[in-house]
Amino acid sequence: MKCEICDKHETVARIPSFDWLTIHKKTIRGLIEALQIIDKYVDHASRDDGHHSEHDVLYVGGSVDKSEISQEDLDRLDKLGFFIDEEFDCWATFN
């Protein structure tokens, strides 16, 4: 099965109880790439650029203004599993 993140590599494993969770050889690289994209749009001066994690979700950055983000970056972040969490006004991922 081809990787859902990069379309180049084979999936390493699927956890049966979590069909949506794919363990990928380049998960760390995908996370780093996503954080680098998000970093371009974070207002570091506002001190609203932190992160928080729970058992199944990672929250990153804050005060997201979707109109300032390029469509290319939105598409790539979506492919990497990141989305804008409207409740907390930040980026989030379940990966």
Image (tube, rainbow, N blue to C red):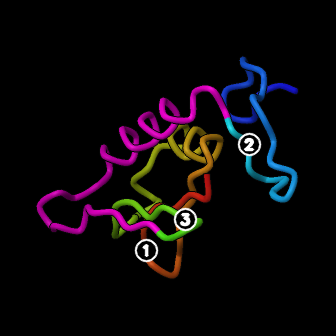
Of residues 82 and 19, the one nearer the viewer is 19
- First reached walking from the N terminus: tag 3 or tag 1: 3
The residue positioned farthest toward the bottom in the image shown:
87
Of residues 32 and 48, the one nearer the viewer is 32
Pair 1/2: label in front: 2
Magenta-tinted stretch: 24-53
Q: Examine the structure image and report whether residue 17 is included in the region drawn in magenta.
A: no
In the picture of the structure, the residue carrying the numbered disc 2 is: 22
In the picture of the structure, the residue carrying the numbered disc 1 is: 89
Instruction: Identify the secondary structure beneath mark 1.
Output: loop
Residue 13: quadrant of the picture: top right
Instruction: Identify the secondary structure beneath mark 2.
Output: strand
How far apart in space, not on screen, are marks 1 and 2 (Cα)?
Answer: 26 Å
x and y, in percent, of residue 65 in the image: 40, 64
- Proximity of marks 3 and 2: CB atoms separated by less than 8 Å: no
Of residues 61 and 68, the one nearer the viewer is 61
Three-letter code, disc 3? Val
Of residues 8 and 72, the one nearer the viewer is 8
